[in-house]
Amino acid sequence: MDKFLDWFNNENRLDPVLKAAIAHFWFIIIHPFDDGNGRIGRAITDMLLAWAEGSGERFYSMSSQILAERRLYYEVLQKVQHSSGDITEWIDWFLHCLKNAMLSTENTTQKILRKAEFWK
């Protein structure tokens, strides 16, 4: 945890979205608590993504999308955790999940706008 926290607090050269992906993976692999590691890992991810955007407000939820894709999430985590240390597959999955979170929000927003227009 000390190494993770040092990296988390001091790594500034890495793209912030990639940092969110790596931080999530690293925290989950460390698994420092008996319970709640997934929730804390998702909170870390959401916090880093908010920092990446320079905003405390986001209209998409990576945490919700991870839960929606939980079966594949666990499959990729398990596979990459027990690999040679190459986390490319994890980062690829994470970025696709992030895209899906944004698309889901876009779809929801479009539905709201259509309903608002209808009732106008």
Image (cartoon, helix red, strand yellow):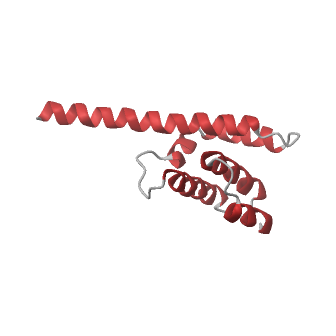
Residue beneath the point at 44% across and 56% down: 55
> Vertically, is 3 above or below 25?
below
Q: In the image, residue 107 lies at what x, y percent?
A: 37, 32
Side of 67 where 89 appears, left or right: right
Q: In the image, residue 4 lies at what x, y percent?
A: 75, 62
Image quarter for residue 76? top right
Which of 120/52 is in front?
52
**Considering the image in quadrants, where does the C terminus appear?**
top left
Residue beneath the point at 78% across and 69% down: 2
Find the residue positioned furthest to the left. Answer: 120
Which of 22/32 is in front?
22
Side of 115 where 54 appears, left or right: right
Q: In the image, residue 36 lies at what x, y percent?
A: 63, 61
Residue beneath the point at 81% across and 44% down: 81
Side of 27 where 83 appears, left or right: right
Q: Is residue 32 visible?
A: no
Side of 103 where 6 appears, left or right: right
> Vertically, is 7 above or below 58?
below
Find the residue positioned furthest to the bottom. Answer: 2
**Considering the image in quadrants, where does the N terminus appear?**
bottom right
Residue beneath the point at 17% across and 32% down: 117
Image quarter for residue 9? bottom right
Find the residue positioned furthest to the front. Answer: 13
Q: In the image, residue 83 lies at what x, y percent?
A: 86, 39
Q: Is residue 120 visible?
A: yes
> Vertically, is 74 above or below 26?
above
